[in-house]
Amino acid sequence: MNPRRRAFKTLLLCVAIVGSFVAVSARAQTQDPAELPAPMSVTTTAESPPAPAPAMVDGDAVVPPAPAAATSSTAAVTALPRLRDDEAAEAAYRRCKELLARPDTEAMTIEAGVAARACYADVVAAHADTVAALKASAGLMVFDALLQRPVQDGPEIPAGRLGVSATLGLFGVWNAVAGGILVGTNTSNVDGPLLVAGSGAAAVGLGIAAGVGGYYLADALKLDEGSARLVASGVVWGTVLGTAIAPSIARLEGPAGFNLALGGVVGAGYVGGGAALLLSSLVPFDEAQVSMINSGGMMGSTVGLLLLPNLAAAGVQDTSMYSLTYIGSTMLGLTAGGVVGRYANYTWGETLLCDLGAVLGVVAGGTASVVLGLSGSNNALLQTATPAVGLVGGYVATALMVREWRADRGAPIWRDAPSVRPVAMAIPVGKSIVPSLGVMGSF
């Protein structure tokens, strides 16, 4: 080894050792002996840092200097108290732990936690200088964190309960009103005020019962916000479609036609709610997707209404064609809204902005029809085309604006695409098995 290089390394080692010795001596001279940490007892021993291992440099062993002792500026505690083992303190600590003893399948209650915390506090106060008190202090810190809960103004109501409860409550009122109408049209010499009073009382009773029943139904089925809104929307759209088909049923002569038509409106609400409940059990929905389904239904029903004058201008006399046109347009809109909601990643508030764009568009289109004199023409297609174009154009333009806004903020625009694949299935029928085809995947 080069002698000059060896001398230089030896000099660096001496400087490091002398510097450490000077630092320790200066600290010992400036600190009061009473403030020096007392030797730790046997129960609280602390191991000194291991001596650094010799490092091999060019074949020579060089021992680096030992790390300097931590000063009061870097250590949180300069002296630990002497802790002692005390059997009475340990017994008190064990009693605290027994308060929490329970089977693994049973959760700890708030009362048990409060009692255990009070027990730990007693151990700390009565046996302050023991190891048991140190362990009880740790238990106090844990329970203080567990028992702290955010302050709430009232009891927490799970998501998806109030919306479906309100919708089904209103549907119960409608059931009572429809029942009163049926009683009035099928009963002769009925007292009018008595019928109104009975229908009103039934409406209040059924409204409350349906609202409470809807709440507990959503709670029993564990419906989330999206599923609950889908069920509520299914009831509404079922009633709308039932109303659309009612004129075709009411053509039957006699009171039977009217009874069937009104009963069909009520029954369609139940069918729509049941279909939505079944769909929510198969495919998950969030509130934004349900809102897009409602947007599609709103646009489809509006287009269906705008198509009816064109049927009249074409000389269509069959009432069923009017009902089927409106129902088909509405169903197409609902389906389109569901498909778009499966891909477009919008929030519930952003879907409402798109609805506003559609409303503004149909108003602008209708105004343009009047201004251009199209409303005075005999061409029903021109009269209804501009509002329809404004409706769809307003929604699409607002949706594109919202998409660009999300892109500027770095928010995701598209959802994960559904992935499904066909699978072979077998359905048992009696003693035989019938081959069938199903789908599997993620929607």
Image (cartoon, grey):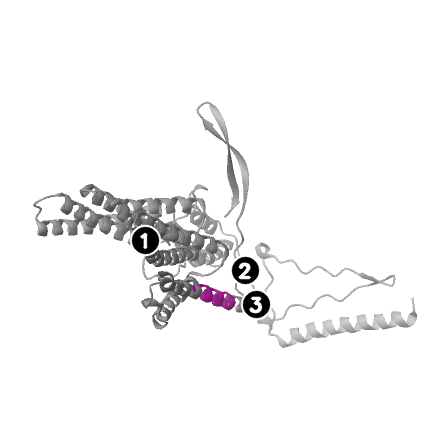
| Front residue (pair 390, 18) | 390
Numbered disc total: 3
Q: Which mark is residue 76?
A: 3
Q: Which mark is residue 315?
A: 1
- Identify whether 257 is placed above or below 228: above
Residue ID at (35%, 59%): 306
Q: Amino acid at mark 3?
A: Ala
| Front residue (pair 325, 51) | 325
Alpha carbons under labels 3 and 2: distance apart: 17 Å
Q: Which mark is residue 194?
A: none
Q: Quadrant of the N terminus?
A: bottom right
Q: Position of residue 369 (x, y in %)?
A: 36, 68
| Front residue (pair 305, 295) | 305
Residue extent of the magenta highlight: 395-405
Write down the residue under mark 2.
82
Q: Residue furthest right?
A: 2
Q: Secondary structure at mark 2?
A: loop
> Going from the N terminus, do you reach mark 1 or mark 2 first?
2
Q: Amino acid at mark 1?
A: Gly
Left or right of 154, for residue 421: right
Q: Position of residue 216 (x, y in %)?
A: 31, 47
Whether the residues at callouts 1 and 2 have beta carbons within 8 Å, the answer is: no
Main secondary-structure element of the magenta-colored stretch: helix
Mark 3 or mark 2, whichever is nearer to me: 3
